[in-house]
Image (cartoon, coloured by chain):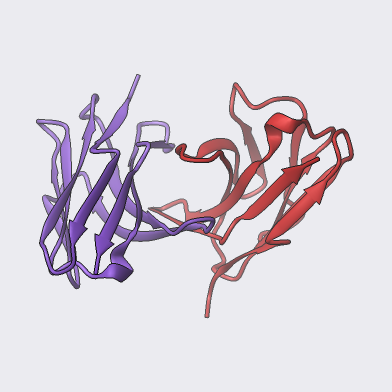
Chain colours: A red, B purple
Amino acid sequence: DAMVIQNPRYQVTQFGKPVTLSCSQTLNHNVMYWYQQKSSQAPKLLFHYYDKDFNNEADTPDNFQSRRPNTSFCFLDIRSPGLGDAAMYLCATSRAEAPEQFFGPGTRLTVL
Amino acid sequence: KQEVTQIPAALSVPEGENLVLNCSFTDSAIYNLQWFRQDPGKGLTSLLLIQSSQREQTSGRLNASLDKSSGRSTLYIAASQPGDSATYLCAVEDSNYQLIWGAGTKLIIKP
């Protein structure tokens, strides 16, 4: 089945230790998104890619970076995680000409 | 600036009841509205998407309506089941092709 896959599902890191979250998709969608969702809150858009065109939201901290080496994969790098970065990180994809977004299962990040 | 509100924040109903979840938005200039379901600790599942030119969409026991002029959408769930228990979020796509989210309604269906 075509889907959005996120690895790992759970990630524990130490304060200040860099971490990378990954997302892959078999939907062949040209748009990919990274969201941060804290408990009982709505998802917050961090970045999105239209093909390889990178779009950074204005209020996304510099501590967060992203890479999209090809259509299928997208990575979220957190350079120096703080306690406030503990959250669920959601990857989504869509086709530019069709607005519906499809989400992966998320990666829950814990910062010790 | 577009704002999306979902009321109530939480809802508990007995199994078998029909129910309505509400979503309101402040700017009627939207491209579409999407309803999602989220189970605890899980990702989001798209339920229904209503284009701005449409008035409603149906999938099984779910029916979503859209009234752009009043800035409202409703998600109707017929014959609720315990498996429907989840948080339901609505999101509107704005002129920048970004989703603006509501905070969600946490639904509990009691057996």
Residue A68 appearing in the image = yes
Q: Quadrant of the C terminus of chain B?
A: bottom left
- Report which quarter residue B63 is drawn in: bottom left
Q: Quadrant of the N terminus of chain B?
A: top left
- Report which quarter residue A8 is drawn in: bottom right
Write the residue at 52% across / 59% down. B42
A12 to the left or right of B3? right
Q: How many labels were placed on the picture?
A: 0
Q: Name the residue at the bottom extreme.
A: A1
Residue A31 appearing in the image = no
Residue A90, x across and y down, in percent: 58, 50
In this orientation, which residue lies closer to the viewer: A108 or A63? A108
In this orientation, which residue lies closer to the viewer: A65 or A6? A6
Write the residue at 64% across / 27% down. A60
Residue B47, x across and y down, in percent: 31, 61
Q: Is residue B65 above or below residue B1?
A: below
A14 to the left or right of A33? right
B67 to the left or right of B41? left
Q: Name the residue at the front extreme.
A: B111
Q: Name the residue at the right extreme.
A: A17
Residue A32, x across and y down, in percent: 58, 51
Write the residue at 21% across / 44% down. B52
Residue A94, x across and y down, in percent: 48, 55
